[in-house]
């Protein structure tokens, strides 16, 4: 088995992991980033990134992620495509078992993000990839000009509905509550978009079809009334599930997100957390990047402490 040692390992290369990589490398730490997929995380799904400070011109999430990746590499961060099978701590050293070997590190930053939450209704799993989707920019173009249902009421749902409205004027957005929970600016755009029909107090209870989605059964949450109507696609944006399987012993909140202090350190000393996997009141790219920077700075201080080189 291939074994190697490094100062800092960052698990995940979304906005949080990429920012941490840059700051870790700039702190002269031997920094290794491990990512299963392409660098960028959920930012890759953003069609128009318009609210990141310093970006006066709208850019795609893909372009943004490429810039962050290149920047981190220029500072000296190393990226590998692999899967972390297990993570354990022995003394002051973390041991990470990868598909391609074993890595030992003095500090770890967990930036594994979160995965899309399912609605959990009949037909959702059966028609996934056949009309049911969790990524508008990925699958929206397949349904150009057709009727699409958007489920959710947060930032992601509003952002994705806006994107889909460029492809069709038959967008129906349903939310189980009586108002959106998204940022006001995003919600207002959706509310004033003539291509999007808004239905509050409404939730899907079944997705029907044969080889692909053909209809959806809805229920009014205030009256209990049900009705069925035709649809070509259902896009689901109802929250996310933090990816914490590697650290079952870390303290988490009621939603399953990892709790940290202001230094981004978890209940496990030397394990720092940033991005959507962390308990945070506001999930945005800029927040994740800021947390990544703080986590890397704190990790550098932790490593200095281990070496007896901390500045007092």
Image (cartoon, rainbow, N blue to C red):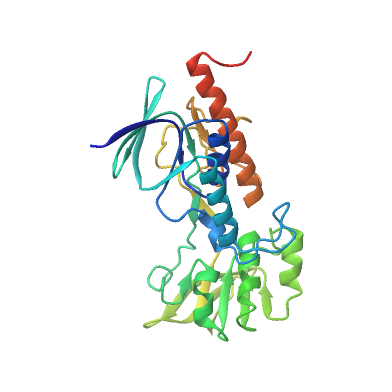
Whether 298 is drawn above or below 91: the answer is below
Please say whether residue 284 is visible from this viewpoint: no
Image location (x, y in percent) of residue 222: 65, 67
Horizontally, residue 294 falls left or right of residue 80, namely right
Quarter of the image with the N terminus is top left
Question: In this rendering, would 151 be left or right of 120?
Answer: right
Total count of labels: 0
**Point 49% across, 63% down: residue:** 119
Taking 23 as reference, is 94 above or below it?
A: above
The correct choice, above or below, for 243 with respect to 186 in the image is: above
Q: What residue is rendered at 72% in x and 65% in y?
A: 187
- Quadrant of residue 45 in the image? bottom right
Residue 223 place in picture, x, y as percent: 63, 70
Quadrant containing the C terminus is: top right
Residue 110 in view (yes/no): yes
Nearer to me, 269 or 256: 269
Where residue 175 sits in the image (x, y, percent)?
A: 63, 67
The image shows residue 47 at horizontal and vertical percentages of 60, 67
Looking at this rendering, what residue extends furthest in the left direction? 1
User: Does 217 appear above or below 95?
Assistant: below
Residue 175 or residue 234, whichever sits in front: 234
Query: Is residue 151 found left or right of 200 in the rendered image?
Result: left
Instruction: Identify the image quadrant of residue 162.
Output: bottom right
């Amino acid at each position: 088995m291939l074994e190697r040692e490094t100062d800092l390992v960052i698990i995940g290369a979304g906005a949080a992991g990429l920012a941490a990589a840059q700051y870790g490398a700039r702190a002269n730490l031997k920094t290794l980033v491990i990512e299963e997929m392409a660098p960028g995380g959920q930012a890759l799904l953003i069609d128009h990134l318009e609210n990141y400070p310093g970006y006066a011109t709208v850019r795609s999430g893909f372009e943004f992620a490429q810039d962050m990746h290149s920047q981190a590499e220029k500072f000296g961060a190393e990226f590998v495509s692999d899967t972390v099978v297990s993570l354990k701590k022995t003394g002051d050293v973390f041991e990470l078992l990868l598909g391609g070997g074993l890595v030992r590190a003095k500090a770890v930053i967990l930036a594994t993000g979160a995965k899309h939450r399912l609605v959990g209704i009949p037909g959702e799993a059966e028609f996934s990839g056949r009309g049911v989707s969790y990524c508008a920019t990925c699958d929206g173009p397949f349904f150009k000009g057709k009727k699409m249902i958007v489920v959710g009421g947060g930032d992601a749902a509003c952002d994705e509905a806006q994107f889909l409205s460029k492809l069709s004027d038959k967008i129906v957005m349903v939310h189980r509550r009586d108002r959106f929970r998204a940022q006001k600016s995003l919600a207002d755009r959706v509310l004033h978009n003539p291509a999007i029909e808004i239905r509050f107090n409404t939730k899907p209870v079944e997705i029907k079809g044969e080889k692909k989605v053909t209809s959806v059964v809805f229920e009014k949450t205030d009256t209990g009334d049900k009705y069925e109507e035709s649809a070509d696609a259902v896009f689901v944006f109802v929250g996310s599930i933090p990816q914490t399987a590697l650290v079952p012993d870390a303290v988490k909140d009621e939603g399953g997100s990892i709790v940290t202090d202001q230094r981004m350190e978890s209940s496990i000393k030397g394990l720092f957390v940033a991005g959507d996997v962390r308990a945070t009141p506001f999930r945005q790219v800029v927040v994740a990047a800021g947390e990544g920077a703080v986590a890397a700075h704190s990790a550098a201080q932790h490593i200095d402490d281990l070496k007896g080189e901390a500045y007092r």
